[in-house]
Image (spheres, helix red, strand yellow):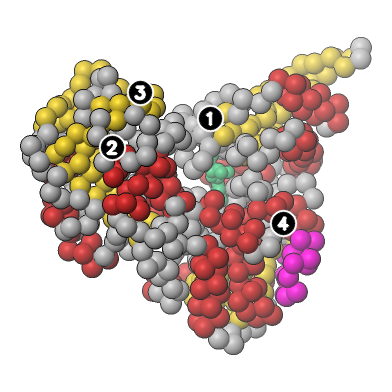
Amino acid sequence: MSTPIAAQDAALPRLHSERVLVLDFGSQFAQLIARRVREQHVYCEIVRHDITAERIRELAPQGIILSGGPASVYEPGAPKCDPEIFQLGIPVLGICYGLHLACEALGGRVESFPAREFGRAMCHVTSPDELLAGLPERMEVWMSHGDQVSTVAAEFQSLAETPTCPIAAIKHIRLPVYAVQFHPEVTHTPQGSQILGNFLTRICHTHGTWRLGDFAQDTIAAVRQRVGKRRVICGLSGGVDSSVVAALLYQAIGPQLSCILVDNGLLRKDEAEAVIREFSNHFHTDLHVVRAEDRFLSALAGVTDPQEKRRAIGHVFIDCFADEAAKVEGADFLAQGTLYPDVIESGAAADGPAATIKLHHNVGGLPEDLSFELIEPLRDLFKDEVRRLGLQLGLPEDIVWRHPFPGPGLAVRCLGEVTKPRLDRLREADAIVVAEIKAAGLYRQTAQSFAVLLPVQSVGVMGDARTYEDVVAVRSVDTEDFMTADWSRLPYDLLARISTRIINEVKGVNRVVYDISSKPPATIEWE
Ligand code: XMP
């Protein structure tokens, strides 16, 4: 997707009188660190590890956190930070690899230990300085490292140790530099938020002024000012992101908002109608529903390759959306539900880390030549913040907690050819999975739960007759960030109910299997 974004969104407020920067050294936890900081009401941004000290001085953060990372500091090409950062007088907290960097930069030795330490460890607080103030003398922490620091410069003071790691937490006696070998950002370090909280309040002296309520008010005011009397188009998908964008814009500009919902025939059971109903209940503004099932299904006829499916759907979506948008007179702006992780991963953030982690598959992406100015009011937010904002804006829990759904919809869960009868079969099975998980009270606990229709028939027996029918796979995963995921340990009784209901109620299916693959190496979707 083309993103002529930064310039336009400069008009949106930079809502952080206080902020903390996370320097990303390739850690799978960098985003988690930022989220944990924001949970303490301090605005936090992830930046490239090689950001200069000069640039940091300009950004004037209250604190700097050096993330962990997979590298070893002495490896050729290991990511380093500008050593001047430690001399800026801005408090620094190094985490894991960040500790190694701080020690190396300020005079210490890091050694590769033959046995990597991974998992829970008992940490003994030997010197409860500001960083570890108020913590129990012995606490559980989560370790995940190969290297560890063997010697620190005389100017470092040790604050904590574990049985295998004598330097588990340290502080510099002259500079405001702290570092920990363990990971305070993960939930396996139960006192982790208190440690981050100590860093933020006692060391960085932040006041915790970052509030979503203010964010909403300020964003609404900024959008109103930027749009003036003009009109904004917003694509609705029924997902939480586009619903929150629509809700924000509705509060900002009311009747100047036009929404477009493309019903591609690949949505979940009754989804298009539910979106229309919810939309009409909450917003009294212009809604265009494009009924395009036939167009999508003819483009998909005979297509079985997953990438081909995505491409075909992407093209038809753009055509449908552009045709409808052309009917909206005077629309200069297009609103999109881009989130902070998309901004980071696409490398579009001004100081953000390079695009490395995930190719983001935004099938709903629109080409540049639609010549709209983009409004992306959620581009500073994480998904959990978007959800909280949605609740604040009065959206129903049903929308706010809806599991994510891929842009290409059921087409990538209908393995093999996508036809209307196969989609209907999948829709029925999927509705049963979701209904039963909700009835068991596990919908909020699982991150994404759905059915997949396999292009496989298997033999069965029903009554006295032999059957040869489709197989449905059930997928349910637990994840915070969707980049890694584990399969949900659903209770057997629940799985049994799902299976019995699908086999009894969905014609043409005689077998149900449960997907017990984690990501990686499997992905969440099957295609
Ligand atoms: P995977 O399958 O890559 O999915 O583990 C990670 C998350 O991304 C969603 N997903 C998509 N979302 N267009 C989207 O908008 C797509 O083409 C697409 N493919 C996967 C998936 O549902 C999960 O939440």
Say whether disc 4 or disc 2 marks the residue closer to the N-terminus.
2
State the extent of the magenta-drawn residues as a range: 276-290
Q: Is residue 23 left or right of residue 191?
A: left
Residue at 15%, 50% in the rendered image: 175
**Can you tell me which quadrant of the image ligand 1 is in?**
top right
In the rendered view, tell whether residue 460 sits above or below residue 236: above
- The residue wearing badge 3 is 121
Residue 486, numbered circle: 1
CA gap between label 3 and label 1 equals 23 Å
Q: Is residue 507 left or right of residue 523?
A: right
In-front residue for pair 32/410: 32
Q: Mark 2–mark 3 contact, CB under 8 Å?
A: no
CA gap between label 1 and label 4 equals 28 Å
Residue at 14%, 39% in the rendered image: 156
In-front residue for pair 98/295: 98
**How many labels were placed on the picture?**
4
Describe the element under mark 2 as helix, strand or loop: loop
Instruction: Decide whether residue 430 is among the magenta residues.
Output: no
- The residue wearing badge 2 is 128
**Image position, residue 48 (x, y; %):** 28, 53
CA gap between label 3 and label 4 equals 42 Å
CA gap between label 2 and label 3 equals 18 Å
